[in-house]
Structures are given as C-alpha cells and as structure tokens.
Amino acid sequence: MKPCYVRRASPFGRGALHVLELLGPGSREVLARVFTSKHGVPRDRACYGRFVAASGATIDDGMVIPRPDESAEFILTVHGNPLLVAELCEALAAAGASEAPPITFPTAWAFPAAGASRIWREALDLLPGVRTLAAAELLLEQGQPEEATGLAGWAEAAVQGSPPPTLAELRAIRARGPAARGLLEPKRVVLAGVPNAGKSTLFNYLLGGERVVTDAAAGTTRDVIEEPAVIGAYPILLSDGAGLRGAGDELEREGVLRMREAIARADLVVFLEPPNASAESRAEERRIRDRCAMLKVYSRSDERRGAAGSAAPALADGIAVSVLAGKGLHALEAGILRALFGAEDPPRGVPAPFLPRHEAILAAAEAEMGAGAPPRALAALTEPD
Ligand SMILES: Nc1nc2c(ncn2[C@@H]2O[C@H](COP(=O)(O)OP(=O)(O)OP(=O)(O)O)[C@@H](O)[C@H]2O)c(=O)[nH]1
Ligand SMILES: [Mg+2]
C-alpha cells in the first residue's frame, strides 16, 4: 500500500473544530475506508459526510477538502471534541495511515512575552473569559506596551513626558472606564412591565431564539429567567420575569416579588408600556423610574393608533418598538447601550482603563495634576509584571 500520513493541524487548546491533514499518495485509499458521503471521496470540491470507525459505527460528521494547496492531499475538519479526534485518528491508523508529527505553533507569535508589563499580563489573563470580539480587541489594544493607542503604550509615553498628558486628556480617558469594563463584565438588564406588555417576546428576540414561552394570556411568565445575551459589542445579562401587577394567584405574587428583586439588582430596567396602558402600568413605571436607571419602551407599537385612529402618537420620552413588525429594534439596542455606557460603540484606537486598578491610578494622577503637580501616579501603569 502507498504511504499515507495523518497530521494534526489545529493548535492545542479548546476549539469548536479540529483540522487534520492527510499527506502522501495513499491518502485517497485510506480516506475511502473512513469517509462516506453522497459523492464518495471528493476529487475537486469540498464535501460533507460521515467519518466511520473500522466497526462501521459513525464517529462524527465533518468536511473533507481535497488538495487545498501543495501541502496536503486532503484536509479533514471535524468537531473539536478531543475524544472524537482521537477516535478518528485511530480509524485512520486502522485504515493504513501513519501519524506524522503535529504542526507546531509559535506561542509568542506577534505577542510580547507575558511578563513585559503588568497591564499586558492583566489583559492576557482576562482574554480567555471574553464573550465578544470587541472585548478581545480592547484587551489586545489596551495591553500592548508597543501600541500607543492603548493604555499601556500611552502611559509609557506620558511617564516619559512625550508628550506630557493634559488634564482634559486624563479626564477623557477616565470617562471611557465604564464602557471598557462593560465589555468584560456583563451589565444586568431587566425587561419589566405589566402582564402582556411583550417582555418575553422581546427577551426571545434579544437572545436570538425562542427561549421562553409567550402567550396572549396575561401572567404567562412566573420565574425570573436570566440569560447571557450580546447587544452590539457588549455582553449583557438579560432578565425576563413576571408582569408587574397586584392581582394574581399565590404563584404569580411570588413571581412578582422575585421580579422586584431582579429590578433592584439591575443596572438598567427596560420598562415596556403596552398600547392603552393601565393606571397600574403608569404607577409601576413611576416606581421604577424613582429607584432605578430606566429606559422606556412603547411596546407592541404596531398596535398603536393616534387619536384619529391613524398615525401613532408622538412618543418623545421612549422608544416605539414592535418585535412582530421588526420596528424600532435597532434604536432600542442603541438606547440600551447609550443608557449603560453613554455611547453605542466601545472605545477603539484610544486609551481606556479596563480594570478598577487603572481607574484608581488615573484618578490619583488627575488629583495630582489638579493640584498643579506632575502626574507621578501614572508610573504605576508602566510597572513590569
Ligand atoms: N402585535 C404585537 N403583538 C405582540 C408584540 N410583542 C408581543 N406581542 C403579543 O403580546 C402577547 C403577550 O406577549 P408576551 O411576550 O408573552 O408578554 P409578556 O409581557 O411576557 O407577558 P407576561 O409573561 O404575561 O407578563 C403575545 O400574544 C404576543 O404575541 C408586538 O410587537 N406586536
Ligand atoms: Mg412573559
């Protein structure tokens, strides 16, 4: 039999997919024993199919890409579960492939060594936990000592006096703290309103799937349900719960109690007012507005009619939203981000403190400059690891 080699081409670590390469003139023959698809072993285009063990049992589904370039005969992409990858390698070995040494990846590739600076270390430590690309970009930009647009690089230059920082600059950098931290620590946003305001429908929309039951019957949702969501570039902890009202059975009253607790913990309450809002809805809104950061939404706006029965009334103090008609949803997401962080877009290309430690140092530097002294405190942002 002609030789065939299998080589692991994904770096170590967790990943949704794993890539294997088949090399050598025996590759097609080996693959024919392991891969089944409508088109057999593909010749000129990528093909989806199943990988099977010598026993005939399915190992996984995946793709086979023939001759992607000069380096291999076939590329196999399978799911990243290491047990599946090991099983597939066994099946390939049983079919006649020998294992080639895995590709090695440079670990310090394009990154300064951890240990170069404390901010860089802080950024690298936070990196595995991020939930959005913007959060990863923030950490890489802010932490890189060479990057003058990030906090670490800016502090290096500021401490050397090239150029010396101004008070206005310090204040502007500090003001970006909440947005930078918001990328790393999700804020709690609660959808509130009377029963049937459309909370659960909006909750499902913002999560991008049918997570909770919605119904025309008032009092459908009882428990508080909290789910991680992403709005714009920001991770958010989003909660839905019981409609706020005094009436209802014991179970519903318990639900309302839990909802009030969730509201008390929220960073922002999105209050939904349905068309023809009751006095109870207005009273609940006042109560929340007095105690919490609140954004008002006129929900189910497709059902609204003005006095003449035609145009919808002007809604200056809130955002008109209809999930079913797909109206006002972008404005709502932008409104939530502005209410939480003062801006829709995360800091990019400018220094921003992403930890309370950085904010405390900047506050101290600002106090020094306010008193007419040089901002010596900034040196703490240039500490080595
Ligand atoms: N026309 C229209 N109907 C909507 C819209 N959003 C929700 N609804 C309907 O309003 C009803 C109540 O919606 P839900 O999302 O269950 O309301 P809720 O606020 O979660 O209600 P409770 O769980 O009972 O407090 C359902 O029949 C939804 O289909 C909308 O934008 N337009
Ligand atoms: Mg509901």
Image (cartoon, grey):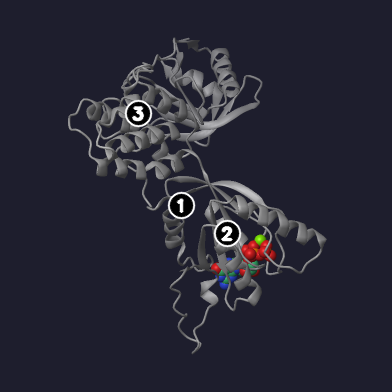
Q: Residue at x 38, y 52 (%)?
A: 344
Q: Residue furthest front?
A: 371
Q: Quadrant of residue 216?
A: bottom right
Q: Residue at x 65, y 67 (%)?
A: 194
Image position of 381 (left or right of 242): left
The alpha-carbon separation of the residues under discs 3 and 1 comes to: 24 Å
Residue 100 screen position, x and y as percent: 45, 10
Q: Which of the two discs, 3 and 2, sits closer to the camera?
A: 2
Q: Quadrant of residue 382?
A: top left
Image position of 198 (left or right of 363): right
Q: Residues within 10 Å of mark 3 (few under 14, many from 20)?
A: many
Marks 3 and 1, the one that precedes in the sequence: 3
From this viewpoint, is residue 63 visible? Answer: yes
**Helix, strand or loop under label 2:** helix
**Helix, strand or loop under label 1:** helix
Q: Which residue is mark 3?
A: 143
- Looking at the rendered structure, the kind of residue marked 1 is Leu
From this view, report whether residue 350 is shown above or below residue 102. below
The disc at residue 291 is 2
* Label 1–label 2 contact, CB within 8 A: no
Image position of 291 (left or right of 182): right
Residue 250 or 72: which is nearer the viewer? 250
- Looking at the rendered structure, the kind of residue marked 2 is Arg
Residue 348 screen position, x and y as percent: 31, 41
From this viewpoint, is residue 45 visible? Answer: no
Residue 315 or 286: which is nearer the viewer? 286
The alpha-carbon separation of the residues under discs 1 and 2 comes to: 16 Å
Quarter of the figure with the C terminus: top left
Q: Which residue is mark 1?
A: 340
